[in-house]
Amino acid sequence: MELRDLKLLKNGIQSVLGNMGRFCCYARRQQFYRSNHAMRELFQEIPDLIGLLCEHQEALNGDAPVFDMEGMAALLQQLQGAQEDMDYVMLADICELQLQPVLVALEERLVSVLGVHVDELLLRKNIRCCGEQNPQLLYSLLPEDIAKECLQVEGEISDAAMDWLVGAVEQCGEKGYVVEPTSSGYDTLAIRREGRTRYMHTNGSAVSEAFSLAEEWLAQGKETYIFYGLGMGYAYREMLSMDDNISIRVVEASRELLLLAMVFAPLWELFGSGRFELVYDPTGHKIQKMSMGLSEDRGFYVFYPALLGIRKQVLRERLETYFVEESSVRTQERSLQGNFRKNSRIGAGNIQQLEALFGGKEVVIVAAGPSLDKNMDKLRQKREGIILLAAGTVLKKLLAAGIRPDFVIMLDANPTVYSQIQGAEDCMVPLLFLSTACSRVTQNYQGEKYMLCQKGFAPAEELAGENGWMLIESGGSVITAALDLCLRLRVKRIIFAGLDLAYTDSLDHASDTCDRVKVVQDTGILVDSVDGGKIATGKNLKVYLDWIERRIAQRAGEEKEIPILDATEGGARKKGMEIVTLAQVMEGEA
């Protein structure tokens, strides 16, 4: 087979696989209007593809046949019969279970011959569409002479220009950024570092993966979507196809990933929609501005695999923190809404009532880090004027040791959090809970209860606004929320115990807590420890550590006058906290 025929067949199979993936996704969701549209496109493409397969059957099958024309004709008849019967279940089954495996096997054979190659027609389309919409971006990726040649000259790209492009792609590879083919015909991006390869898109059905992502993001109901991370743009193409009323702005910090996408991804389809903008932001300043001023119609989301391409650690960690918080709310949206409705009806107290209880007091926030086992007994020596505020994780551990906290705080919406109070529902320790916390906890727990409304959750913001209540920032964990709460309540002093935020003695939690103790292997993430060395931590703990340090640094007004002490006696060092022992705190020496 000639190279031209190989490319033509590869593109034909890729297109059929893509439309097949869309049809199956729509059919499985019983979205028959869209599935009919995808099926019509599929039936328009299949005859041409069958013709190509027939023409090159012998060359494609070789010594190990993948298909025969009688079998393909029979499959086509089955598809037509199921279509006439409007049997969408059978149509999707035939596509997924019979036709798709044959086409994937053929695609893999073609990929083994072609590998990753520069499609000049695709490249020219991308360059022209980018030049029309964002010439500044184009000239930041390509030398001016090459960009102008691709914009102005018809026909083939010159050898000099192609040599530069191939060299640029090779330089990206030397830096660890590569494009690899997949069995679905759609290329994927990969980043190779320290002997590991991480991919941005599946090796399976890239269209099905993109479809799922598109539906997830479109479910947020925004008109303007701002994203960090381009990848190959597959999900954004599906979003624009599925909803004509949205616009998308994508910010990317990696020049290498942008260049590879310009050469290999179908960006022209995105630019051609008139509702897509691509922004190069190597410093992170633009994304910081864009992520502010979000509203009911405007949302900011992170394409998580693209974070691997960010060289600036501060920017990468900031976006990771945002992703953890945003995705947590998004994935638990149904539970959050249901919990909020029930929690707002139980007649709990509110944050304004806590001001009289906490204001001017010293608060020891008790977390569940492994170092708590070393100094927990010192909590028995609590002086007058000190409040013990315990995370739900350590409530039963403290009660079992004869230590009664003054308050317990819980945030999690997940029903599994109920284990933190199970058997202790009648302990009568006042409960502080986030408005979206598990409703089973709030309904079964006895004693005083106070509901905290959080920023970033619209129903809670609305309820707090109607009643004149303060809002808190949860920060994604019970400890970050407790810190923010105490600062807003203008306590006299904040002291942490059990706040390791690291794997002290290779452990993740204190003994006898709801989250079991386990030995933690090397995570590859090291932070400064309280003893002056380094200590291993996890990605989520590092996110919380960064959040706490940032919250402390950003204090203003009266909040800056509140001393914050770390009496953990182990774990990570926290900037902005004075290191003391718990004994010093309880004895009034610190």
Image (tube, rainbow, N blue to C red):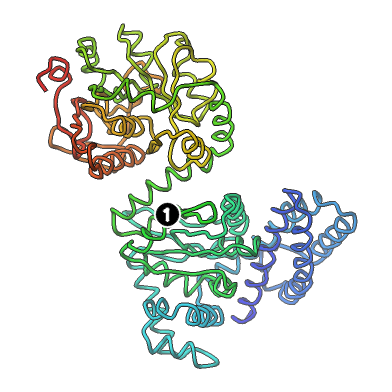
Side (left or right) of 224 relative to 16? left
Q: Give the image quarter of residue 545.
A: top left
Label 1: how many Cα within 10 Å (few below 14, some 14–19, many 20+): few
Nearer to me, 94 or 4? 94
**Disc 1 residue type (three-letter):** Arg
Identified at 15% across, 22% down, the residue is 581
Residue at point 33%, 15% (across, down)? 406
The residue positioned farthest toward the top in the image shown: 402
Q: x%, y% of residue 348?
A: 48, 21
The residue at the point 54 percent across, 18 percent down is 443
- Figure label count: 1
Compared to 333, does 55 lie above or below? below
Name the spot of residue 220 as percent of width and height, x first.
57, 50
Image quadrant holding the N terminus, namely bottom right
**Which is nearer the eye, 73 or 33?**
33
How far across and how far down the image is residue 139, in percent? 39, 81
Query: Which one is in front, 577 or 49?
Result: 577
Dividing the picture into quarters, in which one does residue 10 lie? bottom right
**16 in relation to 540, above or below:** below
- Split into 4 quadrants, where in the image is the C terminus? top left
503 left or right, relative to 225: left
What is the x, y in percent for residue 44? 78, 71
Q: What residue is disc 1 on? A: 198
Give the structural element (helix, strand or loop) at label 1: strand
